[in-house]
Image (tube, rainbow, N blue to C red):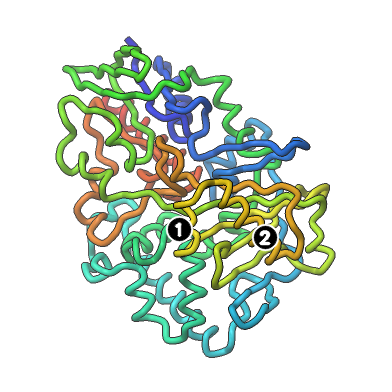
Amino acid sequence: MLDVLVVGGGISGLYAAYLLKESGATVEVLEAQERLGGRLYTIFSPEGHPIDLGGQWVGPQHHRLLKWISQHQIPLHKTYTEGYNLLITPARRRKYKGTIPRLPLGALIDLGIGLEKLKRMARQVSATHPWEITRPAWDELTLAAWIRKTFYTQTAKETFRVGLATVLGCEPEEVSLWHTLFYIRSASSLEALIETENGAQELKFSKGASSLIETFANTVPHTLGDPVVAVERLPNKVQVRTQKGRLLSARAIIVAIPPAVQSRIHWEPPLPPLYAQLSQHLPMGSITKVIAIYNRPFWREEGLSGHILRLQGGIRITFDTSPPDGAYGQITAFAVGALARSLLRVAPEERDRYYGQEMEVLFGQKPQYLYQKTWADEPWTGGCYVGYFGPGGWRYFGPALREPLPPIHWAGTERAHEWMGYMEGGMAAAETTVQTLLTSA
C-alpha cells in the first residue's frame, strides 16, 4: 500500500507528488491522458518550434515557479514589448504604449476611475477565506452588472470587458463581481494580472512549457492513460479503481484535477452535498487560444510590438511570443466573446480557417502555420484557463473548494489562495495540501 495516490498529472499534482517524495512518502501520480502536464501542453511545428497550446507565461511574482525554474536551469525569455501596441475599434486603429490604450479623453478618464475603484474593492476581499462575504451586494452581482453600473462611455465598457474576459477566461455575464475581486486579490494586484512587463505575461518558456513538465516526469512515479473512475473511502485508507481495472490502495489521496470534472469519478460513500455540487457551481472558462507562426516577426519592422487589443471580432487580444533572436515570428492570440463562443459549435478545421483569416486581417499576412486549441474539447479538463464562481458561489461552496475530507485532500490551481488560475497557483495549492496532509498524518 502506498502512502499517497495523486489523481492528476498537471503542475499541481506533480509538485505535490514531488514534495511528498522528498518527505520520504511513497507516492504515485495517476493521469487520465497519455501525457503529463494537464493544462500545460506543448506541441512542435514542422521546423521544431515549440507551440504552447496551454499555459506558457511566468511572472516575476511567481516565486515558487521561478525557484524551480532556476534550480533546473529551464530557459526563459521576455515577452517582446518594444514598439507600439494597437487598439482596434470598429472605427479606427490607434497606436499606444503602456498598459492602458489611447482612448478618447472621456473614455480614458472613465476607464481609469473604474479600474481604481475595482482595485480598492479587491483589497477588501480575503485571499485565505473568500467565502467570508463582507459585502453581500458584491457577491450578488455579476461582473457585467457592475460594468453597466460603473462605466458611462461605451468605449470604456468594451475595453474593460475585453481585458477582464481575457484575464478571467470567461464572459462578464458568467462570473460574479466577488470572484473577480478575489482573482485580483489572489494575484496581489490588478497590475500583476494584466501587465506584460513586471506582470504575469513577462516571461515565456523558451523551449515550451513541456521543458518544465519534463523536470517532474523524470523524478515522480506516474501512470499515463488510465483515468481514475472510482474512489472508495475506507477506515484509514482509500481504494482507487482505474478505467483499465487497476485497484490501488493508499493511506491518503490528493485529487488535483479541476473541480468541474471531479464528478466524473464515482465516490463511495458519496461526497457530502456541498462537495458533490461544487463541480456544478465552478464551471471552466472557454477561451480559445490561437498560435500563428510566420517566417519572421515582420511587425517589428513597422515599429509594432505585436500586442493588439481589439474591441470586436473573434480574436480580441494578441502578444508577440517570438523567440528572442527573432528567428521566426510567433503571435499568441486569445478568442473571447460571443463570436468565439459560437465557433465552439463548429469543427476544429472550420475554426482553423476562421482564425487564419482573422490573423491575416490583423497582421496583413497569412500565417505559415496556425494552431488553435479550446480546452472545452478535453474531457478531463473541461475548459480553460480556470474554474470560476458565479454569484453566491464563494458564499455557499467556497469552503468545499479547499477543506479536506481526510483521507481525501485537494490540490489544483482552483484551490489556491495565491495566483488562482496560474502555474504558481497550482504549486501554492500543492504546497498547502502537502503541509496539511503531513501534519495530520
Q: Is residue 173 left or right of residue 404?
A: right
Q: Position of residue 256 (x, y in %)?
A: 38, 33
Image-based side of 205 in relation to 439, left or right: right
The picture places residue 195, in percent across and down from the top left corner, at: 58, 62
The image quadrant where one finds the C terminus is top left
Q: Residues within 10 Å of mark 1 (few under 14, many from 20)?
A: some
Label pair 1/2, CB-CB below 8 angstroms: no
Q: Residue furthest top?
A: 1
Residue, disc 1: 341
Tell me what residue is drawn at x 68 percent, y 33 percent: 73
Q: Position of residue 31 (x, y in %)?
A: 44, 25
How far apart in space, not on screen, are marks 1 and 2 (Cα)?
A: 18 Å
Where 239 sits versus 101, above or below?
Answer: above
Looking at the rendering, which quadrant does residue 436 occupy?
Answer: top left
For the question of whether residue 340 can be seen, the reply is yes
Q: Nearer the viewer, residue 409 or 154?
A: 154
User: In what quadrant of the picture does the N terminus appear?
Assistant: top left
Note whether residue 59 is visible: no
Could you tell me which residue is drawn at 50 percent across and 40 percent down? 39
Position of residue 172 in the picture relative to residue 208 (left or right): left
Decide: is 386 above or below 304: above
Image position of 345 with respect to 173: above or below: above
The amino acid at mark 2 is: Met
Crowd class of label 2 (few under 14; some 14 to 19; many from 20; radius 10 Å): many
> What's under tag 1, amino acid-wise?
Arg
Residue 155 image position (x, y, % from top left):
51, 81
- Read off the residue under disc 2: 359
Residue at 69%, 43% in the rendered image: 76
- Whichever of callouts 1 and 2 sits on the residue coming sooner in the sequence is 1
Q: Give the residue displayed 48% in from the left and 72% down from the top.
A: 160
Q: Dot 1: what SS? A: helix
Q: Which residue is nearer to you in this view: 126 or 175?
A: 175
